[in-house]
Image (tube, helix red, strand yellow):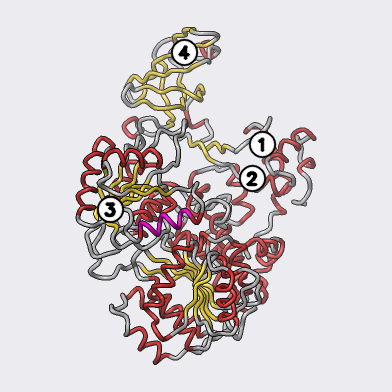
Amino acid sequence: MLSDPVTVIKGIGEKFAEDLGEMGIHTVEDLLYYFPSRYDVFEIKPLNELIHEDKVTIEGRIVHEPSLTFYGKKKSRLSFNVEVEHVAVKAVMFNRAFAKKQLSSGDTVTLTGKWDAHRLQITVSNYKKGPANELAAIQPMYSLKGDVTNYKLKKAVGNALKTYQHEIDELLPDRYLESYKLPDRSTAVSTMHFPESRMDLKHARRRFTYEEFLLFQLKMQLLRKIKRESTSGNAQHYESATLNEFVNSFPFSFTTAQQKALNQILADMKSPYRMSRLLQGDVGSGKTAVAEVCLYASITAGKQGALMVPTEILAEQHFQSLQETFGERAMIVLLTGSVKGKKRKETLATIENHEADIVVGTHALIQDDVFFDDLGFVIVDEQHRFGVEQRRVLREKGLHPDVLFMTATPIPRTLAITAFGDMDVSVIDEMPSGRKAIETYWAKENTFDRILQFIGKHVRQGEQAYVICPLIEESDKLDIQNAVDLYHQLEHFYQGSVKIGLLHGRLSTDEKDQVMKQFAEGVMDVLVSTTVVEVGVNVTNATIMVIYDAERFGLSQLHQLRGRVGRGEKQSYCILIADPKGETGKERMRIMTETNNGFALSEQDLKLRGPGDFFGKKQSGMPEFKVADMIHDYRALETARQDAEEIIEHNMLENDPAFQHLQMDLENNSVFYEKLD
């Protein structure tokens, strides 16, 4: 059986099994599904197609006796010329003195190694006497630990396949295998370990990519179904006419994207199931206006609304903004950690007896002593800043409101589908007309004095600026500017003519709020800060964002920081001070200066950095796939999602015998639901 311990396989003793256990391989099944991490492809290409510094394979005839020299302690260098396509290519081998006796003038050899196109030289890592066609074209390479070698592991897998391959059950129904031209599971497992051609390997990988995505999406869709069905009777009967009057009272027209997102949310509110929706939109795209309309819809349905944000200062800003928007239409209260004593008791009473229509606050909203009368709609702003636990508390209070998660961090659709598969996703990907684009420039550090003069000129015109840098204090490890030094540098430069503030992560929450409040009120002209300002206050007077050592930040973070300016009517600027050494850093700077579109940037960021950094490791809920790659296999992800939706919607798992093995696999992994909830 596939569940047998690995020791039943020929050649695996106790010590080998122990080493395999360190690699997470305990059973025959674990071994069969421990796929290679990469493949070395020994494919001979014409010399003019070889790429400088790539690993390549060439075949040729040795034209003179190899020359062996010794240097250092037991170090050697063997070199010889090989005739390839009538061209002399120099081959160099290090510390292979024994090869001198094996290779002679006139021998045909196949060499694999690093190619130097400038010198027409190959630094050999593998060699073999004879032509290439006798060589295995594709070499699987495994991720290894301890004393396990590639050779030993490959041999063990071969023995396991001989005995157990017939026990590998097919998970996917025939309709998918035929429709997508996928190999069966047993053949695909064998091909992953022993590929005979690149085409076979491609199809085996396609098969497991689709299978992994489908299983994941089925789990997500089941979770979504469970959530929906556990909250039936949740429909909100809002007053459409009153709502239309409210929308018309805004001093601007909604963009097409805003209107589409609003319609999606309102349809969810009308449905009998609890809404769980993510609203994405760039800074300034008008998410808040959409959220305000939804809150009002809930009020007209006789319910209460709540808006939960990460910081007190942001809560205060939203509180003031909502009061201006709603006027006499709703009673709005503020609940943060600063609301204490008698004031807090009074606020809690207004919430519990439904005098308060909308409650704005931080995580103070979900503390034990907060009771709502009839909470119908909750907005969680910058949702990735709240832990899963904090979001769960709302449900554990016995409340099942419709929940809208909002983020100004544009998440590529690829990631949104995967990480938030149990949510619906709405996107506002259009900016209001008339909004001035932020002009972005990339500068070198030696122009810093000119940049400070530029800031000084705008400060004299009554504007404000941010100067951002990565670290708080000096670091031996990284030679990058830090906030404290920068603060003193600016003080020295301006000699008191510009009022400068300092904000960093070592300050207490109260101190941070105080500094931010002073900047928002115009007490300071320039704020020197670390990235704590990333999700911050709406300072319409701030027109300049300078980011020091900008190459240290990802594109999405740079874009978030840039979004702190450009909130008023004046032209705004973002200046990136960077001297990136690598191509990735230079590419980031180029992309930032060329586009203001957060979604385009986030797609680029995903390609440059990969998904791991996107949300932070712990909270992301990002699944670990063995074969699938969310970026490169984007189409397969979309296909798997559509198929999973159809399977769950039509109850195929329970009703169609062709889905029996899929259902069994899902049931065996049911612990997944607990992890995700």
Q: Which residue is mark 1?
A: 153
Which SS class for mark 2? loop
Residue of label 4: 78
* CA distance for labels 2 and 3: 52 Å
CA separation, marks 3 and 4?
60 Å
Measure the alpha-carbon separation of dots 1 and 2.
Answer: 10 Å
Relative to 209, 438 lies left or right: left
Question: Which label's residue is closer to the chain start, 3 or 4?
Answer: 4
Tags 2 and 4 touching, CB below 8 Å: no
| Of the two numbered discs 2 and 3 in the rendering, the one whose residue sits closer to the viewer | 3
Q: Is residue 287 above or below residue 231?
A: above
The crowd level at tag 1 (other Cα within 10 Å; few <14, some 14-19, many 20+) is some
State yes or no: discs 1 and 2 in contact (Cβ < 8 Å).
yes
Tell me what residue is drawn at x 35 percent, y 34 percent: 581
Is 259 left or right of 438, judged from the image as shown?
A: right
Percent across and percent down for residue 567 are 30, 63
Disc ID at residue 544: 3
What is the secondary structure assignment of the residue under circle 1? Answer: helix
| Label located before the other in sequence (1 or 2) | 2
How many neighbours does mark 2 have within 10 angstroms: few (below 14), some (14-19), or many (20 or more)? Answer: many
Q: Earlier in the sequence, mark 3 or mark 1?
A: 1
Front tag of 3 and 4? 3
Residue marked by disc 2: 34
The magenta span reads 511-519
Relative height, residue 183 to residue 89 (above, below):
below
Q: Amino acid at mark 1?
A: Leu
| Tag 4 near tag 1, CB within 8 Å | no
Residue at disc 3, secondary structure = strand
Q: Amino acid at mark 2?
A: Tyr
Inspect the magenta stretch and tell me whether residue 214 lies in it.
no
Inspect this view and state whether residue 203 appears.
Answer: no
Counting residues from the start of the chain, the first of labels 2 and 4 encountered is 2
